[in-house]
Image: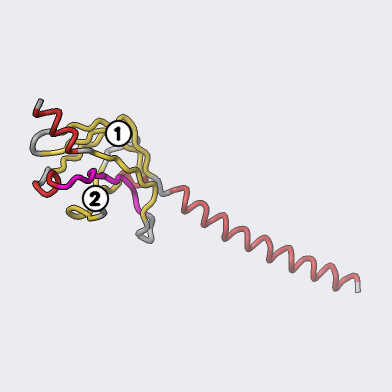
Amino acid sequence: MKKKIILLFSVLLILVGCGREAEEEQQVEQVTTYAKFQSLDIQIDKNQIIITGEADASDNKFYYSVVQAEKEIGREKEVRVDKTWGKFIIEIPIMKEMINLDEVVIVNLYTRSSEGEIINPNYVPIDLQLEMSEESE
């Protein structure tokens, strides 16, 4: 009887240990894919939005997309940085449709997991109406 209890206890201990190993591997996957941004500067010219800054991203790359009024403008684009906290420049052309809408333009900076899911989204709002009215003054 004592041997059966010890055997049962041993099997349970092994199963519990194996279950935790899978959890730890999944957590490592989540931690290793990241994108962080600092020193963002936004300038608006008559023809384009210029975003400069520094990025620390896994695989030295991140993505951005532009959204206005819940509609994606253009396609997702990839940005590469040379190293940790590498400098980047994003130039986004300003289209007439963007100016005519009263909605704020949102630039979304992020990275993607190996499954393609968006990770660490950073939303940068840009009010073109405000910028254009300041330029006309």
Does 82 lie within the magenta span? no
Q: Is the magenta stretch mostly helix, strand or loop?
A: strand
* Frontmost residue, 90 versus 61: 90
Q: How crowded is mark 2: few (under 14 residues within 10 Å), some or many (20 or more)?
A: some
Q: Nearer the viewer, mark 1 or mark 2?
A: 2
Question: Does label 1 or label 2 sit earlier along the sequence?
Answer: 1
Question: Along the line of sight, which residue is nearer the eye, 77 or 7?
Answer: 77
Give the labeled residue for mark 1: 54
Q: State the residue in front, 115 or 14.
A: 115
Q: What residue appears at the point 37 percent right and 39 percent down from the top-left corner?
A: 36
Three-letter code, disc 1: Glu
Q: Where is residue 11 in the image (x, y as percent from the top left)?
A: 74, 68
Q: Say the numbered circle drawn on residue 10.
A: none
User: Could you tell whether 89 is left or right of 57 in the image?
Assistant: left
Q: Answer whether residue 109 is magenta in the image.
A: yes
**Quarter location, residue 15:** bottom right
